[in-house]
Image (spheres, coloured by chain):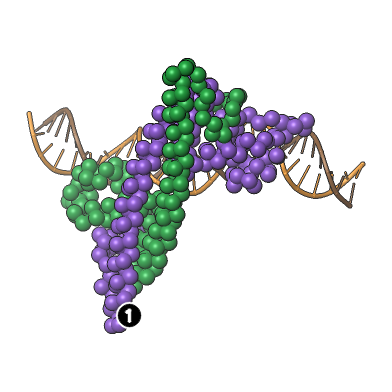
Chain colours: A green, B purple, C orange, D brown
Amino acid sequence: MKIGELAKRTGLSAHTIRYYERIGLLPFADRDAGGRRDYDESILAWIAFLDRLKTTGMPIREMLRYARLRAAGSSTGPERRALLEAHRDRVRTHLADLQACLLVLDTKIGGYAEAEKRTHPDEQSPSPDDGEPAGARTPRA
Amino acid sequence: MKIGELAKRTGLSAHTIRYYERIGLLPFADRDAGGRRDYDESILAWIAFLDRLKTTGMPIREMLRYARLRAAGSSTGPERRALLEAHRDRVRTHLADLQACLLVLDTKIGGYAEAEKRTHPDEQSPSPDDGEPAGARTPRA
DNA sequence: GCTTGACTTGGAGCGCGCTCGAACCCCTAG
DNA sequence: CTAGGGGTTCGAGCGCGCTCCAAGTCAAGC
């Protein structure tokens, strides 16, 4: 598989794939006779995993650490496990934060919805109070 | 309240507070006789709200749009509501993605845990397969 | 009066994660 | 044979969200 097809199949750009190889996130790919990268299907699983780490907010620096441990052999298993566990804990915390924020967001949206309801019958708009700067001279925006 | 105390109470740096004012995320603060910013308690609610938007991944650009709508008066209620609803949907989607990733992470960690268990009795390490580049010549890391 | 330290401004700089441009190479289809 | 569309490398540039520096002002305590 050439880089263009890999790009299509992973959703990454070819530029990004080369960048990932450059920094060491992806292994140095085999080249064909013309010097072009030629990928094996197996790269897809690794990229999918990286994508999950990325989705969960792991910085590249840390993915790199994981990649290097993996490359260093099976003796690094415990360290990799620890790395993933620490990351999982952070993700869980963030997840909880997000859920809390979602509740607040729902409440706020509910307030706007109510204001609109109250406005329709008699053409007034009390508008929900949220803590935004009220009269608000918001400058240089 | 001076900027230093506001910083302590919000967890933002004074630098960041000034930056937010500069770009219009915070209203232009009243100054005392000496030209220093003097904040009212009411700013805290607004900053807390911004913080929630930030936590949920809203880009500053969009927070600004919200802030400008709010400043434009109560007639913009519906537009603000729409903005928050769109954001809420994105957050929900992201939340679902995170949860899916968490499951994968748990599975993977479980694999490492098992490998360690198997290793302890008889000193071998089969190591869980995940799709990482196996023998891995990871370059220029 | 003098020192200390928190504040002011404007603008430069930074870390992250890409993203792109230039110049070149190579394979294939017409 | 030629044109086109991929691919290659190296290195510069970008958008985001701060973060910090320099030089100056001001208020309170010794």
Indicate the quadrant where residue C26 lies.
top left
For the residue carrying disc 1, how many other residues have a C-alpha within 10 Å: few (<14), some (14-19), or many (20+)?
few
Q: Is residue A7 above or below residue B111?
A: above
In the rendered image, the residue lying farthest to the front is A121
Q: Secondary structure at mark 1?
A: helix
- Report the residue at 36% width, 37% height from top: B89
Left or right, B108 with respect to A31, comes to right
Residue D3: x and y in percent read 16, 28
Left or right, C10 with respect to B140, comes to right
Q: Is residue A25 visible to the viewer in this orientation of the structure? A: no
Residue B94: x and y in percent read 36, 44
Q: As rendered, which of D10 and B40 lies closer to the eye?
A: B40
**Residue at the disc numbered 1:** B120
In the rendered image, the residue lying farthest to the top is A123
Q: Is residue B25 above or below residue A3?
A: above
Residue A31: x and y in percent read 21, 52
* Picture mark count: 1
Q: Is residue B28 visible to the viewer in this orientation of the structure? A: yes
Q: Is residue B127 above or below residue A135?
A: below
Indicate the quadrant where residue B30 lies.
top right
Q: As rendered, which of A95 and B133 lies closer to the eye?
A: A95
Q: As rendered, which of A111 and A47 lies closer to the eye?
A: A111
Which quadrant of the figure contains the C terminus of chain B? Answer: bottom left
- Report the residue at 60% width, 24% height from top: A135
- Report the residue at 38% width, 56% height from top: A63
Residue C19: x and y in percent read 35, 37
In the rendered image, the residue lying farthest to the bottom is B122
Which quadrant of the figure contains the N terminus of chain B? Answer: top right
